[in-house]
Image (cartoon, helix red, strand yellow):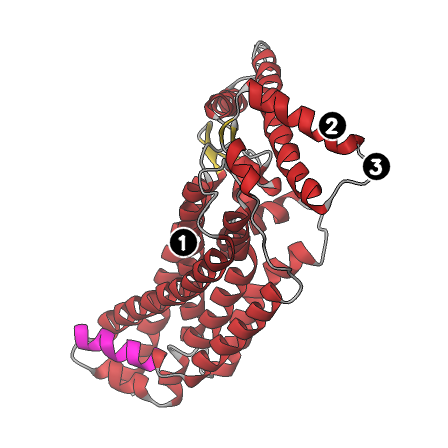
């Protein structure tokens, strides 16, 4: 079995197009990240504000903000410092808004007509809001850009390199007549499929690992390693997120969720490859499947609730991750509210199982045809 897996790994990683495309992507991304951005100049003053936001810090930040706004022409350094004071004010506002939101939901729960899933959903929401702690300030530009990389460049790199590397896993066997040999070999279809899946998983993990190393090296060299203790709600996109975690915990969760979506997409690629005799057709079909959810959300504004929800829980939605954590979204499972990230992982497991079952069925039919010929 090891030799079979090694053989499948060799077939995937020997493709020169992978390395050419990876090089082109990294060059384009590097130009995009460095071109329009001026050199980062860290503020030493932010150190005195880091940590827990006491009332004294909040009051002093408000006074410093008012002093800068009172000036006719604040300096560039003062404008940059004012960004700190505004961030502190936002975090303090989030705490007050959260207390108001908890009180509003608790009042709604007094209505006896609200029951079942909706009541459980509201109770879970309150418990999550009560655990939130946004009373901490840290300069977090580095972690913010690393997190945003996953939603943008990371998504593109994973999808593109998986399309190039995996779309021909079965199609090339058909083109070279290798399928006849594999189906008639000692271990037959079952072990061959498992070997291809394991090799494809290893390739997918490698792709994600490569751009993660690039992402970390590039952003840490510019911004250093500060800011990971900042709450998730420090980032503008996640102001309404009910999840209690700092940026370090979220980044680890984000990569894990991205991998879950990538593995589900891997199974789809392998299924399409098993159906297509030509690798070109496999790449085109898989490419269309990958880009449709992205185009649907980026280029079109579909006011169709079920379609938007389907895209959120699709493999690309899970690989992008951010929509699952930005707001409070749940799925009804026997009146129990399942948080969106948990539901998304479950959906990816189910999708992978369905694709695996269909793949085995399709190849079984091919094996039967091969055996009778």
Horizontally, residue 82 falls left or right of residue 322, namely: right
**Label 2 environment density (alpha carbons within 10 Å; few <14, some 14–19, many ≥20):** few
Eye-nearest disc, 3 or 1: 3
Q: What secondary structure is marked by label 2?
A: helix
* Residue 172 screen position, x and y as percent: 39, 84
Q: Quadrant of residue 359?
A: bottom left
**Label 1 environment density (alpha carbons within 10 Å; few <14, some 14–19, many ≥20):** many
Q: Residue at x 38, y 78 (%)?
A: 170
- Magenta stretch bounds: 1-12
Q: What secondary structure is marked by label 1?
A: helix
Q: Are marks 2 and 3 in contact (CB under 8 Å)?
A: no
On screen, 31 above or below 221? below
Q: Residue at x 43, y 40 (%)?
A: 342
Judged from this view, the residue extending furthest toward the right is 72
On screen, 108 above or below 194? above
Residue 260: give its label.
1
Residue 11 magenta: yes
Check the picture and name the quadrant holding the N terminus.
Answer: bottom left
Write down the residue under mark 2: 66
On screen, 176 above or below 262? below
Write down the residue under mark 3: 72
Label located before the other in sequence (1 or 2): 2
Label located before the other in sequence (2 or 3): 2
């Amino acid at each position: 079995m090891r030799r079979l897996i090694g053989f499948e790994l060799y077939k995937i990683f020997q493709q020169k197009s992978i390395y050419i495309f990876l090089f082109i992507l990294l060059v384009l991304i590097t130009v995009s990240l460095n071109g329009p951005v001026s050199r980062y100049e860290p503020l030493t003053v932010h150190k005195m504000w880091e940590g827990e936001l006491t009332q004294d810090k909040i009051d002093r930040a408000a006074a410093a903000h008012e002093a800068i706004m009172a000036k006719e022409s604040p300096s560039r350094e003062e404008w940059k410092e004012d960004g700190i004071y505004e961030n502190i004010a936002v975090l303090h506002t989030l705490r007050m808004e959260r207390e108001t939101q908890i009180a509003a939901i608790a009042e709604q729960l007094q209505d006896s007509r609200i029951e079942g899933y909706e009541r459980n959903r509201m109770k879970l929401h309150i418990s999550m809001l009560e655990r939130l702690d946004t009373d901490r300030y840290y300069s977090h530009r580095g972690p913010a850009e690393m997190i945003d990389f996953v939603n943008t460049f990371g998504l593109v790199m994973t999808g593109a390199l998986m399309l190039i590397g995996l779309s021909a896993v079965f199609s090339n066997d058909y083109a070279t007549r290798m399928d006849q040999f594999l189906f008639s070999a000692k271990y037959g279809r079952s072990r061959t499929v498992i070997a291809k899946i394991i090799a494809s998983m290893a390739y997918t993990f490698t792709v994600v690992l490569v751009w993660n190393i690039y992402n970390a090296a590039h952003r840490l060299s510019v911004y250093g390693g500060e800011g990971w203790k900042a709450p998730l709600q420090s980032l503008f996109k996640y102001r309404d997120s009910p999840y209690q975690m700092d940026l370090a915990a979220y980044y680890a969760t984000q990569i894990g969720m991205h991998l879950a979506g990538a593995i589900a997409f891997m199974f789809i690629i392998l299924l399409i490859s098993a159906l297509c005799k030509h690798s070109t057709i496999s790449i085109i079909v898989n490419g269309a499947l990958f880009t449709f959810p992205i185009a649907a959300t980026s280029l079109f504004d579909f006011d169709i609730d079920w379609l938007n929800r389907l895209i959120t829980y699709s493999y690309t939605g899970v690989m992008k991750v951010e929509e699952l954590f930005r707001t409070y979204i749940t799925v009804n499972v026997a009146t129990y509210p399942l948080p969106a990230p948990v539901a998304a992982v479950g959906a990816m497991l189910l999708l992978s199982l369905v694709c695996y079952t269909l793949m085995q069925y399709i190849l079984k039919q091919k094996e039967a045809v091969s055996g009778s010929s």
